[in-house]
Image: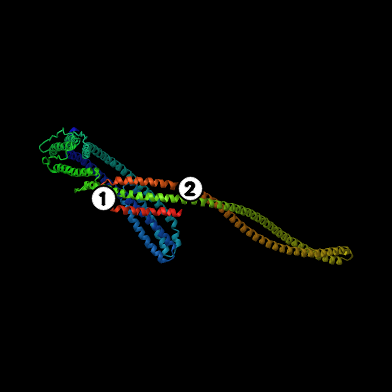
Amino acid sequence: MRFISNLPIGRKLALGFGVLVVLILATGLDGVRDVRRMEGLIDAMAAQHALPALDLREANVQMLFTSRAVRNALLDEDPAAVARRAGDIARYDSAFDARFASYARAIVREEQKVMARDVVARVARLRPLEQEAVAAALAGHPETGRALLPAMRAQADSIDAIFDALTASKVALMQDEIATADEESRDAVLVMLAFLAVATGFAVVTALGIGRPIVRGLREVAAAADGLADGDLRQRITVTSGDEVGQVGRAMTRMIESQQALAQVAAGLSAGDLGVAPQARSEHDALGHAFTGLHATLGRLIAEMRTLVEAARQGALATRADADRFAGAYRELVQGTNALLDAVAAPIDETAQVLDRMAARDLTARVQGRYAGDFDRIKGAINTAVTTLASAMEQVHVAAEQVMSASAQVAGGSQSLASGSSQQAASLEEVGGSLQSLAASATEGAASAGRAQQMAGAARERVADGRQAMTQLSDAMDRIRASSGETAKIVKEIDAIAFQTNLLALNAAVEAARAGDAGRGFAVVAEEVRNLAIRSADAARSTAALIEESVTHARLGVELNATALSRLEDIDREVGRMGEMVTTIAQAGASQRDGVAQINDAVDEMNGVTQQVAANAEESAAAAEELSSQALVLNDLVASFRTGSGTDRAEAAPSGAAGPARRRVSPARALAGAA
């Protein structure tokens, strides 16, 4: 295995695939041989068994056709049809002879040959009978031919039995051949599977033996390359084979070691450690030479930066670095640092001068230099701050003068407000007395409305009771009318019974008259019954008349009751509306009472507020006098600053003070007038 692992990859693949191709060819040749053998078996089976079996079956079919044609000829009465049947029989016999002769030529077993000769002999005995029967049918004597049918049927049955035996024998031979073919097919499959198993096993062993070391080594090298591409220099390759993969692994190991050394140098440079100097591996090591030059350049650059930083710490902003010692971007970096110091020092100097003048209360100083970027923003911010401060001082001066004028006006207005507030308090006391009288009247009105609401509710309840009683009365009248109707029906039934009784009495009298003396007593009874029936009919008619009159009076009572009920419902609705109106009046009275109470509370609160306003007005007058004195002090302080517009301020001060004074007078006068 060590020898194979040290072979080049091309030779490994050629060796493995060569052996695999040989095994595949052997498997294919064995398969072709087996297929050819199976084709021979199939051809032999078809020639010796399948085709003869088809000939035997077809001969049997032709014999059946002959038997059917003979029967049809005996059944047909048309001579032309019988003649056609005779032609069909001759054609069927010829086809039978051809098929059976083809079958007989393919017979290989002696017992089958014996049965075939027996079939030929029996057919030879059957055909004369068939010909005789057909001839009788052609002669117009089908009954003679039908007499031959039992003999023909016996011959045909014996032939069918021999055909069945031949078919069974042929089927048995075919099954034996099929079993032999199956056995040979299984043997061929087993041999082919053995070849395939050997080829597959060798392929697997070859793939694992050749591919696994290659794949393992390539994966290890690829993983190391991926880690190296991601900047991970902790990769370690353990491939030791002598093929191309081992060569790549050893080359990658040297490259990783080189990168680790350079990374150590770069880490020292990034950490500011210039003590680790890079070493070039050869004269062609461009990266090593580049790191050596970078190390020297960074050393000089750091030395210059240290000089500038130390000078800046000492306040020597005029110190500059030597840009001639560098080239390219490093030279631009040093020059940019010098320019940065120049740009920083100039605005700092001028800003310090402006701040010195501001400290001396000179607000006319400004930064005049031309700067860019944030320095221009600083310049604008300082100038804006100075300008804003100067403007604020001027506004404070003007405001102080206005405060002095306004404080005097506030003092006067506060006195007027205090006087007006006292008068307003007296008026509010009078209003409070009137509101108390109004509150008492509103309370009495609300109580009266509540009593009226209770009376309206009681009236509505009584009306509702009356309406309910009328409704019950209407129901009772309806029941009376219904009972009267039922009674009238009963009376009518009694009248009908009396009428029938009268008829029966008349019939009984007639029968008694027919009976003579024997029926005289029965005639007397019949007469009495008839009289009772007449009296019952009269009483029933009188009762019916009275009931009809009662029903009429009950209907009238129901109608009058309905009218009274309608009137009570109208009264109920009116009483309801009156109750709603009284309720509304009661609610309005209660709301009026509550409103008067709220107004009374508000007047009391206004009285207290008015007294508080009067006290506050007196305090405001005192505060205004104090404010005037403080404004005078503030005005003197602001006048000590130079803002660059002192003359304009002096001229504009009177008018500036007068304007705000007039604006502040208006609220005071308005307050005094309102009081």
Judge from the rendering whether residue 621 lies leftward or rightward of residue 400; answer left or right: right
Residue type at mark 1: give it: Gly
Asked if 300 appears above or below 418 in the picture, the reply is above
Q: Which mark is residue 646?
A: 1
- The residue depicted at 85 percent of the width and 66 percent of the height is 509
- The residue depicted at 38 percent of the width and 60 percent of the height is 89
How far is disc 1 from disc 2 in space, using C-alphas? 48 Å
Judge from the rendering whether residue 571 lies leftward or rightward of residue 497; answer left or right: left
Q: Position of residue 598 (x, y in %)?
A: 53, 50
Foreground pick, 300 / 488? 300
Residue type at mark 2: give it: Gln
Residue, disc 2: 611
Judge from the rendering whether residue 34 lies leftward or rightward of residue 481; answer left or right: left
What SS does tag 1 mark?
A: helix
Q: Position of residue 556 (x, y in %)?
A: 72, 64
Judge from the rendering whether residue 327 lies leftward or rightward of residue 516; answer left or right: left
In the displayed orientation, state which residue is furthest to the left.
Answer: 283
**Can see residue 171?**
yes
Give the total of numbered labels: 2
Q: Position of residue 16 (x, y in %)?
A: 20, 39
State the colouring used for the structure image: rainbow
User: Which quadrant would residue 281 be assigned to in this image?
Assistant: top left
What SS does tag 2 mark?
A: helix
